[in-house]
Structure formats: structure tokens, C-alpha cells
Image (spheres, rainbow, N blue to C red):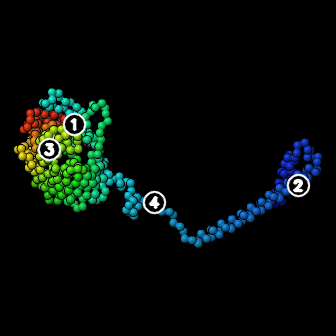
Amino acid sequence: MSKIMRTMMLAFAVPFALLCAAPGVNAASDPDALARALEQVNRRLDQLEQQNQQLSARVDELTKQNDSLRAGNASQPAVAPAAAPAPAAQVAKADPKAVPADEWASRIRWGGDFRFREDYTDNSLNPHTRARETVRARMSAAITINDQFKGEVGIGTGNDPRGGSLTLGEASSRKYVGLDLAYMSWRPIEEVTLTGGKMREPYVRPGRSAFFDNEIRPEGLAVNYRDSRGIFGNAFNFWLEERAAMDDSKLRGGQVGWDGALGATKVKFGAGYWDYHNVQNRFPGFANSLVSEFGNTIYGTGAGARFAYDYDIGQLFAEATFPVGGIPLNLFADYGHNFEADNGLDTAYSIGFLLGKASSPGKWEAGVFTQKVEKDALFAQWTDSDYGNGLTDNDGYAWRVAYMAMKNVLLNVTYYDTQFAVDVGNEADYDRWQLDFNFTF
């Protein structure tokens, strides 16, 4: 410690020592007390000087170490700055198992629809004309797994196999929502698709034919073939009911045909075979607890009711679409015959047309078809649920007008002028009006 600094510290320490002297002692008049105070100050200064020397030595040591580290770093090559994280696409390419979240999102296509319906029914067997409002809602996610595999999972209202409409006015009760779609499809080559699960209809339904309800979601396996020439084939093996203690009921069948163009006319025609296997002598309710033969011939009553026939149905179908004054006109015909019914009530046909196509805002369509289904010509649990009270043994007409008011908003009116029990039992008139507000998203 320098002499100047030591002198300055003494200058401050002496008056401080005097102030800190014991109370009641006059330090200025007591030389012994002053000497003792100065001695204490000197000892403290000696201690501070020793600490200062130690700190100075430590600083010198750290300075030498720092100079040594700098010299060593100067001889090393420069270190490049840390690389920025690789883009998500590069990470996925380096590791095939790592799929970026944004790529997964692009593989999923969401869709759905909502329908509000005003429904008026006049059944001559019922003195009361029924007026009701119904809703139907569906939503699904279509997923692309890779170039060969795709799938779809969907939910929908209702638990009726032939429709998802729910009637309003049941004390504001909660409505049923169930699994509507759940399938995977595999396309190993361009011409072939194999589908398994609960699927959209994988068969041809010409025009507005009501041989099959358009809301049926078949369950099982299907194979579809189509080549560049327009030749197509469909084969399917669907479950009707799985049973633990007896043979299962299934639908096995297929269709073959051609779908192409002849000039400005689009043409589709073909033939099909539908084998409803193990239906005869089975309870007509299947998984339902109530008898639901829907017009087919049965024997027995209640829990003892059984189908009288199997349903092995041959089918011929055709449709053509061509412009008339710049407006598309679709003509179609469908024919079916059950080879297993021996009561003579084994034939069905449907013929009709649709003019226009309500496919974009401002577009419209209008059409009519006539259909006759004898009692055992078709398997009734799959026929249209609106035409002829949802029964076989029917006849009549269906008229339809539709208009797309704006994007994704379709309005349509359908009028069914039909009869049922036309061959067996007491014939009844069945008139039905439906006003639909359809929204897709």
C-alpha cells in the first residue's frame, strides 16, 4: 500500500477512533486512550495491506492464464457458426418416419353435409296426414395414407340402415349419432381398387333408380376394376348378419359393363348378379328386434316370422347422357328379376329421365321416374325407403326439381305419387312431399 494512501487513511481513521471511544471518556485529554486507538488502526491497516497484496497476486495469476488461452485459440482453425435447423421437408426426407405436421394436414380432407327437410305424407290407410320436420347431419375425414392406400372415417345421425333422418319434436331429446363410414381402400395398380370396411356404395346405381337406397353403407369387401377403354367390373361380399350359432347371411355379387362416350353422348350399361345368401327361413328383422320384411313374403308371425324365399337377383341397367339445347339430359333404365321366388311376383323395373344438373350456383334440374317392384323381386331391406312407403309390391312415379341457390346450398322438392300392396293385400295410395334444404361443407 502506498505511503500517500496510508497517510490519507490515518487522517480519516483518527477522528473515527475518537468518535468510537467509550462513552464518558474524554479522548482528547487522555493520551493513553489515544495511543491505544492509533495502535488498533495500525493493526487494521496492516491486515488490509496483506489482503490487498493477496488480491493483487491473484489478479496477476488470472491475467497470465487469460493470455495463455488467447494464444492457444489463435492457433486453432475458426469455428463455423451453428447451422440453422433444417426445413421440415428435409428432416422428413432424411428420416422417412418423421412426417411434418403440415404434410399430415394436407393428407386429410374434411367434408360433410346438413339437410333440413319438410316432410308431408298422405297414406290412404291412415286417416291422419302426417307433417314433420327432420334433420340429417354427416361429417367425414378422407385420409390419403400414400400413393396406394386411402381411407375415410365418418359419423352421421340416425341408426336406420336406409337413412339418417331424425324427426324433430321428441321433447327436445338428444339425437342418435353413430359410425357412418369406416373403410380403407388399396389401389395396387391403376385399374383395380380393393375396399374393406363400412363403405360408400361400390356398385353402379343408374340414374335415380330406387332399387337401392342411396344411404345404404355396405359392410364387407369390394373390388372395383376399370380400364382405359371404359370396361368395368365390380365384385362384393357384404355382411347382412353375422351369427354365432348358425350360418351367416351375406350378399355376394358383382356387375360388369362399359362406361364411355359415343360422340357427345356418355353411355353406361351392364349386367349384375346379387345373391342374398342364407336369407330364406331367417328372421326378417336381422339385427333389429322388430319384424321388418318391408313387403317381402314371410311365413309365421312375431318371433316366429321367417323369409319365404332367398333373393338371387339378375340385373340389367343402362343410362345415357347427352346435351339438349346445351342442357344435359340423362335417361336411365334398371331391370331386376329374382330367380328364387316361385310365386310369380319376381320382377322389378325403373325408367326415368333428369333434365339439367344443379351442380353450380344458378343451375337447376328436373326429372321424373316410374318404378314397379313386385313383392319378391328385390330384397326389401335395401330398397329406397321413401318410394312406395319403403316397401316392395309398389308402383308409381317420383317427380323432382332442384336448384342450387348459391355455392354449397341446394334446394329441392320431391313428390312421390305411389301405391303399395298392389299385388297382394289391400292396395293403398301413398303420396309424399319433401322440401329439402341441403348444405355441404
Q: Which mark is residue 436?
A: 1
Dot 3 or dot 1: first in sequence order is: 3
- How far apart marks 4 and 1 lie (CA) works out to 54 Å
Dot 2 or dot 4: first in sequence order is: 2
Amino acid type at image mark 2 = Glu
Q: Position of residue 33 (x, y in %)?
A: 91, 49
Q: Which mark is residue 307?
A: 3
Relative height, residue 397 to residue 206 (above, below): above
Q: Residue furthest top?
A: 127
Q: Which mark is residue 85?
A: 4
Amino acid type at image mark 3 = Phe
Q: Are marks 2 and 1 in contact (CB under 8 Å)?
A: no
Relative height, residue 321 to residue 95 (above, below): above
- Disc number lying in front (3 or 1): 3
Residue position marked by numbered label 2 in the rendering: 39
**Closest to the observer: 182 or 6?**
182
Q: Position of residue 434 (x, y in %)?
A: 19, 35
Amino acid type at image mark 1 = Asp
